[in-house]
Structure formats: C-alpha cells, structure tokens
Amino acid sequence: MEKPTRQTPFYTQHRAELLVLSSQIAAALLHALARVVEVGSGLKERVHPFTVLQIRLFITVLGCTAYLWRARIDFLGPTGLRPLLALRAAGGVFGACGFYLSISYLSLSEATVLNFIAPLGAIMLTTYWEGRTFAFLDLIACITALAGVVLVLQPIPIYKAVAQAEISSSISTDPYAHLKGVVSGITGVAGGIVAFSAMNRLGKNVQPAVTINYFGVSICIVTTAFSTIMPEVVWPTRIESWCLLAIIGILGLVMEYLLTAGLGSDDPRVTIMIYSQVLWALFLDWAIWRSHVNVLTVLGSMVVVASLAVPYLFRESSHPKEDMFSTRSGMDDIEEGQDEAHANYISLE
C-alpha cells in the first residue's frame, strides 16, 4: 500500500477514521432519539424500549436482506458456523434489550459507558475458552474500567461527598428506578459479552450482514412475542413518534454501513474512534436534556475509554507483524451489533 504523501487530500488520508467517527456520531444520535421516545421528552406518548428495538431492527433487517439477496450470499451463513451465529444472536438479544431498557432510567452517557464494559468481559471469556493466560495488562484494564464505571454511575455516598449538584430532571431521582437501570445495563453487558465472544470466534469467516441479520431477526421475534404478553409493548399512535422511529431505523442502517466501510482499514486509530461514542453521548446529554456533567462523570468516562484503548494500542505497537485477527474482529463486530451495541454495540456494543 502506497504511503500517503503531503499532497494527499485530508479525507483520502484519513478516510477510514472519518467513516468510523461518523458511524459513532450516528450511533449516539440514534441512541439519543431512542431515549427521547422512551422517556417521552417533548412528546405526548412514551414508546416501550422493545417497540423501539422492534422497529429499528426491522428496518435494519430489510436493508441487510436486500444486500445479501443482491450479492447472492447465503442468508443462513456457513453450515458449520450457524450454532455460533445463533449464540451471537441470543447474546445480542440480551445485550440490546438490556441497553435499551437502561436508557429509560439512566442518562445516555451512563448507559453508554456501562455498555462499553462488554468488550473487556469478552476478552476474559475468549481467553478462558482458548486456554490462554490472562494478560496482566488486560487485568489492570478490567479493574480500571470498573473503577471508571463507578465514577460515572456515582453511588449516592460518593456523589454527595464530591458535590451537592442538582440532579437533572431527565434522570429518575427514584433510587429503585435507578437500580433498575443499572441492573438492565448489567444484563446488557452480560449479553454483550456472550455476543462479542461468539463474534471473536466467528472472525471474518461470516459476512457481517449475515451476522447482523441473525441478530435483527431474533430481536424482531422476541419483541413481537413480548408484545403479545405485555400490554405496554404496543405500537405508537402519534405521527411524530413514528417519524422519530423511522429516523432511528435509518440511522441504524447508516451507522452499520459507515462502520463496515471504515473498519476495512488495519490502522489501530480506526478502532479507537469507536470509543468517541462516549464523548458524543456526554454532549447529547447536555444538548437535549441539559444534564449536569460533573467532573466525576467526565473523569470516569475517560478512565473507561483509556482502559479499553490503551491495551489495544499496546498490543498493536508491541506486535506489528503479529496477526491480531481475533481481537480486531471482535472489536469490529461489537459496534456492528449495539444497539447497540454495542454495542454496541455494542457498544462497544
């Protein structure tokens, strides 16, 4: 590959980074809009998180199916990898449902940072699966990330000891509701760990659209089933809610496309751009809900992002010739599935 020269246009030289950065802006926007319809900010009705997921992933499935049909790719993927695809879908369902439930009770930045713990959990699980020794650097990263999450979620004693700032009206002041948000987020992290670990094993042996379709179809089936037993899981009745849900679905497709296009590069800086979603979530919390962003929140977010980014960069710089395929593939597929998210996705997310 020809080395970029000084005459190379900025966009051409940094195309991959800009694509991934744009995908994370789209991801943060769709998550913010999802929270808007879930909490009813400025709307006359609230939409259940499962309904948001159902419509968003239905649009994603339509787009991925059209692509697979046009490219003449098997919708079910390679026969030997279908159990892993099913496991990825099952983990993704828990991951996405947990995350979308958590943003009903937590701020967008809190839910996003909590969701980003899943990649570290996936590293631990895949290390155990493969019988490898858990690296000291990864252990430090996990401990540091957990400390960062504590700073972001700010348990009441710590929060009161640091500042008596007024709690934003967009975040529930009910301790039970906040606990439900944290539990939902942790459930999402657990599901994300399973999904991301499965995707690490899949590697690049499966077309990303096939993986996304497995996840999307599973979400549609599960949310439809819940709509038959939960009276509150119903479709919205107002046109503004439908417009926002349509935008969420379109943003999801745009995010998937930009991310897939950007992650084709082997530059480690591209993967680091994924973590910018935390910064966009903090900004949108302030811009939409005027949430108070205190020092602990910013510090905790930086700690979590650093704990994820530094080990990856260290491995890249220490082993430039080594095939970092499995780790790289997992990070790629994390954002293709959050929804996520990691979420996602995963995400990370």
Image (spheres, helix red, strand yellow):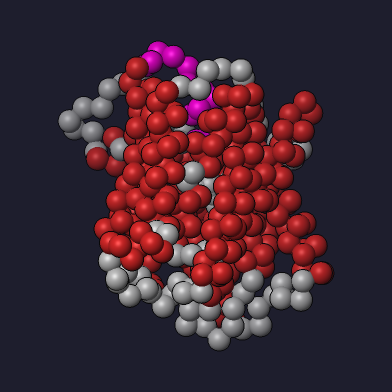
Q: Is residue 51 left or right of residue 143?
A: right
Choose between 106 and 244: the one closer to the eye.
106
Up-down: is 319 above or below 208? above
**At 82% from the left edge and 69% from the top edge, which residue is drawn?**
228
**At 41% from the left edge and 51% from the top edge, which residue is drawn?**
150
Give the x, y percent position of residue 183: 58, 57
Choose between 330 and 67: the one closer to the eye.
330
Up-down: is 273 above or below 47? above
Q: Is residue 258 left or right of residue 220?
A: left
- Mark yes or no: residue 23 visible: yes
- Residue 333 location, quadrant: top right
Give the x, y percent position of residue 317: 33, 21
**At 45% from the left edge and 29% from the top edge, which residue is drawn?**
139
Residue found at the far bottom of this picture: 44
Q: Is residue 324 magenta?
A: yes
- Residue 236 location, quadrant: bottom right
Give the x, y percent position of residue 74: 74, 36
Q: Is residue 4 magenta?
A: no
Residue found at the far left of this picture: 6
* Count of marks, rendered view: 0
**At 61% from the left edge and 33% from the top edge, which residue is drawn?**
197
Give the x, y percent position of residue 104: 54, 68
Numbered range of the magenta stretch: 319-332
Choose between 114 and 249: the one closer to the eye.
114
In the rendered image, the quadrant that contains the N terminus is top left
Up-down: is 17 above or below 319? below
